[in-house]
Each structure stands twice: as structure tokens, then as C-alpha cells.
Amino acid sequence: MAAPRILQEAGDRDRIVIPVGAATNLEKGDLLSYESSEAVLLDADTEDATFAGYAINAVSSDFSEPDRIVAGLKGIIEYDAASATYTVGQQLKYSAKNTVTDAAAANTLAWAAEGKTGTRVATLIDVVALGKLFGVSA
């Protein structure tokens, strides 16, 4: 499994700072879930409703400073993917740690940003456009 690669990072208006729980280690690019007022590593496809974006910085429980993660709400990040053919705009969901697969219109957390066949895919993340964690009124 390769580490996530941030291809286009969120700008200043597209990031938020979220507290991180004790004994939590997060790496740059990790997919984040917002649970009990803290950021944690996304670990289930049904956590799309609490999806908070991706980690812009790394956080380790070994750091002596207060633990906070900068979460990117928008960006293009390359993740491992289930072996398949992906089309631009295809809905993607979590399948394993920092790995995505076809969402088939359920549990979407990102869209394919490129058309390709393989086991890595560039994803377009836009947490606000998803309208889940941050509800959007019509």
C-alpha cells in the first residue's frame, strides 16, 4: 500500500483545524472522520456521513504540543484503489485504510479526477459539496 499523494492541496479557505484524540497518529493524506468532536482515521465505508476531509499535516501522539490536525476540505489526492477502470466523475467510497473503490451511488466521499485502469486513482475531494458533515440547504 502506497502513501496518499496530495496533488492539489486545499487553499486557506478550504481547510479547518480539528482536535485529535490522545494516542492518535495521523499521516499526511489520511482520510479523516469527525467522531466525538475529534478527528480520527476513517475506518469504515459507512462513515461517509462523518467524513471530514484529508490530513494536510501529520500528527503523532508523541508530539508534546496539543494535538490538532489541519483537515483539507477540498483537494485532489491520489489513493490506492481497488483494481478497476475509473472514469472522471465516478463516485468513490472508502474500502480500506486510504483506499477507495466504486461507490455505486452509496457512501460517496470523493469522485475520480481521472479516467484510468489500475490500482491508484486521483480523487477529487470536496467535503462541503458532499453535503453530509456540513449540511447544504437548497
Image (spheres, helix red, strand yellow):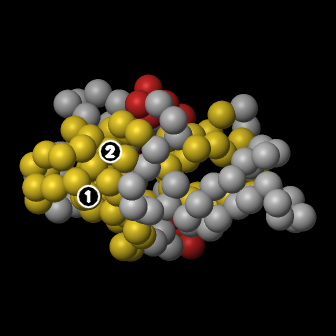
Which class describes the residues within 10 Å of circle 2: few (<14), some (14-19), or many (20+)?
Answer: many
> 9 and 97: which one is in front?
97
Helix, strand or loop at label 1? It is strand
> 56 and 61: which one is in front?
61
Question: In screen coordinates, is 1 left or right of 19?
Answer: left
Residue depicted at x 41% and y 39%: 96
Image quarter hosting the N terminus: bottom left
Question: What's the amino acid at mark 1?
Answer: Arg
Helix, strand or loop at label 2? It is strand
> 59 and 33: which one is in front?
59
Q: Position of residue 5 (x, y in %)?
A: 40, 68
Residue linked to disc 2:
100
Q: CA distance from mark 1 to mark 2?
A: 9 Å
Q: Position of residue 48 (x, y in %)?
A: 44, 34
Residue depicted at x 56% and y 72%: 12
Residue depicted at x 35% and y 30%: 107
Q: How many marks?
A: 2
Q: Are circles 1 and 2 on residues that touch, CB within 8 Å? A: no
Q: Position of residue 100 (x, y in %)?
A: 32, 45
Question: In screen coordinates, is 111 left or right of 97?
Answer: left
Residue depicted at x 10% and y 49%: 85
Q: Which label number is shown at residue 120?
A: 1
